[in-house]
Image: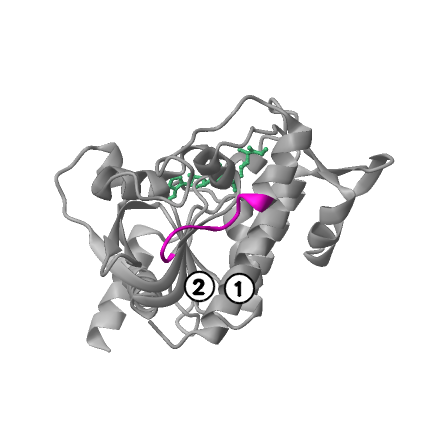
Amino acid sequence: MRGERSKATLYAKRYPLYAKKKEEMMLDDLVISEAIIKSFMEDFLQSIKLDVAIAGAGPAGLIAGYCLAKEGKKVAIFERKLSVGGGMWGGGMMFNKIVIQEESKRILNELGVRTKEYKKGYYLADSIEAVAGLAFQAVKKGVKIFNLISVEDVMIRGEKITGLVLNWSSVEMAKLHVDPLSIGCRVAVDATGHDSELARIVEKKIGPRLKTESGGIMGEKPMWAEVGEKTIVDNTKEVYPGLYVAGMAANAVFGGPRMGPIFGGMLLSGEKVARMISKRLKTRTPE
Ligand code: 48F
């Protein structure tokens, strides 16, 4: 009480214009800090053992997380950047509109994102609205998104992915020599986009043992929307025991073309990977 009184007196002296009446609540900077630290730590600890760990909060990772959470799975997404949404914000060449096809329109509409027919079979959406809708609905369904955290390695036990190895992106950017921390998962998803970073890590660490034709990463092919949008769904699958690829990472790993600012395939790929994983987790005993 004495401390509170002297704080109030000091405040009144320094900032007479803003000094509040005694009965008004005063904001305590330390309470703000404590609230943030405690709540973050609780979330992080809750995520130390997951059903599904997703690397990358682009459109494919976000929709995969949303669909898995809808099925009651404990899922977290780790995103390197400050913002989620990956390559969706910028539409095509910074014209912030995206195009989607008939089959994937229902996914955006389920999230409350508006779509407008441009020509038969082509729909437009505002890229900002699309990212906001994806992120908001994923979080509301129970997906925990950790931004500013990069996946820098994987854990492999008995020829199966059992977890992801994480570090602050700032540590990575500053090239600081700081050891990471690990989280466990029954299944992991590489939704890191063009760089297919998780599959790349597996290839680098244990050799060409991916489920691709060459055993290694086949590499993304030149732009071709028609083919890219089809192959991305076919290429969404398990690439190493316990590791699935979704979104652009799927085409990068299995050698499909890129497709530019048409995003229907990303959404269908995220939805497909969630369906495959849900089925797998239902039929197998906890690993
Ligand atoms: O690149 P990104 O949007 O991948 P996507 O969900 O969608 C691809 C489209 O945006 C576009 C396209 C459409 O035709 O081709 O490129 O497949 O999102 C990938 C996210 O993963 C993050 C990255 O910052 C981005 O937000 N990411 C990449 N590597 C890591 C990572 C990592 N090692 N750890 C954590 N996040």
Nearest the camera: 276 or 266?
Answer: 276
| N-terminal label among 1 and 2 | 1
Name above or below for residue 138 compared with residue 282.
above
Q: Which residue is mark 2?
A: 75
Instruction: Give the percent coordinates (x, y) of residue 251.
Output: 51, 36
Q: How is the image coloured?
A: one colour
Q: Which residues are magenta?
A: 234-242
**248 is higher (above) or lower (below) than 22:** above
Does the magenta run of residues contain 236? Answer: yes
| SS type, badge 2 | strand
Q: Which residue is mark 1?
A: 68
Three-letter code, disc 2: Val
Q: Position of residue 11 (x, y in %)?
A: 30, 58
Packing grade of label 2 (10 A; few <14, some 14-19, many >=20) is many
Q: Is residue 129 visible?
A: yes
Q: Secondary structure at mark 1?
A: helix
The location of residue 53, given as percent across then percent down, is 39, 58
